[in-house]
Image (cartoon, rainbow, N blue to C red):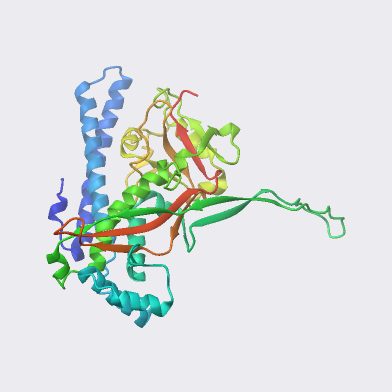
Amino acid sequence: MDFDITDMAPEHKSGGAVRGGYDDFRVTFEEFKAANDERLARLEQKRGDVLLEEKVDRINAALDAHHRRMDELALKHARPALEGRSGIVGGAAALEHKSAFEAYVRGGETGALRALETKAMSAGSNPDGGYLVPVELEHEIGQRLAAISPIRALASVRTISGNVYKKPFMTAGPATGWVGETDSRTQTTSPTLDALSFPAMELYAMPAATATLLDDSAVNIDEWIAQEVELTFAVQEGAAFVNGDGTNKPKGFLQSETVANGSWAWGKLGFVASGGASGFASSNPSDALVDLVYALKAGYRQNAAFIMNRKTQAAIRKFKDTGGSYLWQPPAQAGGRASLMTFPLVEAEDMPDVAENSLSIAFGDFRRGYLVVDRAGVRVLRDPYSAKPYVLFYTTKRVGGGVQDFDAIKLMKFAAS
């Protein structure tokens, strides 16, 4: 029933591997439900079974392993390939840039890139700060990050040309209301505006290459750079979007000030208590999840999703509704997302484990609630000296992020009240 990622079929057959992994996952979930139903029945009869508890935990862990492997297969299948595209975005100029960039990466030749900068009167790149990658490669890196960075996949993403993006919002607006055709109108007051600032911070990766790889003309350099930096970028920004303190990195949504949802105010994120000091309530534990869903206004719920890590998801997987149906459901199709109470469930390993006063579950419309800011341009600086005989490629991009609508995200705090 298990499968090994190292035995995956070639790229054009990877869709079959994803479907095969999905079938195995569904079978494991059915085994989990049967074992957990038996466990619950014995608990109701007050005759717990240690071996049965261990069996349920073992199958639950197997479900996580299957899910992780299925995600990896789906990601491999979803990655776009640079090689073999029908055209280069931007025509002849882009093709010239791509050719000059490849000459720089492979052999350190900077003449063509400098000539392009002179022609464009560009001061955005230099030998000390690195050279801008071709637009096609920049788009490729962005697509790959969207596929593997959980918060970026949900959030709004805006590309800017400066170092800071400022988003205005209205703290007090003009008077509005309904009036009849001939009724007098009260003069409206001027709106009061403020602004949220989203500075873009530098994120870097430093892949290394051998001279043999660079001399091999069959190696697609763009594809190689994208593959080397995607995981490093995704891991670093994923952690920052959740827990970043805003110092030289984006500000994560969990770093926002929090308050009990009944006392919510702009600038803070509301939370709902789980009912248990360091976990869910001992009776009707899923009630807290219902409270969390309805803490969010209806206008946000239609595009809302749950965010938690795998360990928290494993605990919730055992919950049932009053009709006996499991609240957690596997993906409806290969490559899809699991759901919780019909809402998509997104795994973010940077979310904290369940513990006393932890904020381990988030629920909301992250497209409206969280903003990711990308400064246009990814730079690469070739360094053949620092790690001889390897060549290092100092690759940088500038990223920012933060909460943009404090009413669109709600949290679950693991506390009695």
Which corner quadrant holds the N terminus? Answer: top left
Q: Up-down: is 236 above or below 410? A: below
Q: Up-down: is 212 above or below 284? A: below
Residue 19 appears in which quarter of the rendering? bottom left
In depth, the one of 169 and 183 nearer the eye is 169
In depth, the one of 41 and 398 nearer the eye is 398
In depth, the one of 36 and 188 nearer the eye is 188
| Residue at x 46% of width, y 39% of height | 255
Q: Is residue 201 left or right of residue 67?
A: right
| Residue at x 12% of width, y 66% of height | 212
Q: Up-down: is 84 above or below 30? A: below
Q: Is residue 77 visible?
A: no
| Residue at x 40% of width, y 49% of height | 151
Q: Is residue 235 visible?
A: yes
Extreme-bottom residue of the structure: 92
| Residue at x 43% of width, y 64% of height | 376
Q: Is residue 126 left or right of residue 48?
A: right
Residue 230 appears in which quarter of the rendering? bottom left
Can you give x and y, in whole percent of width and height, for residue 117 in the image?
38, 75
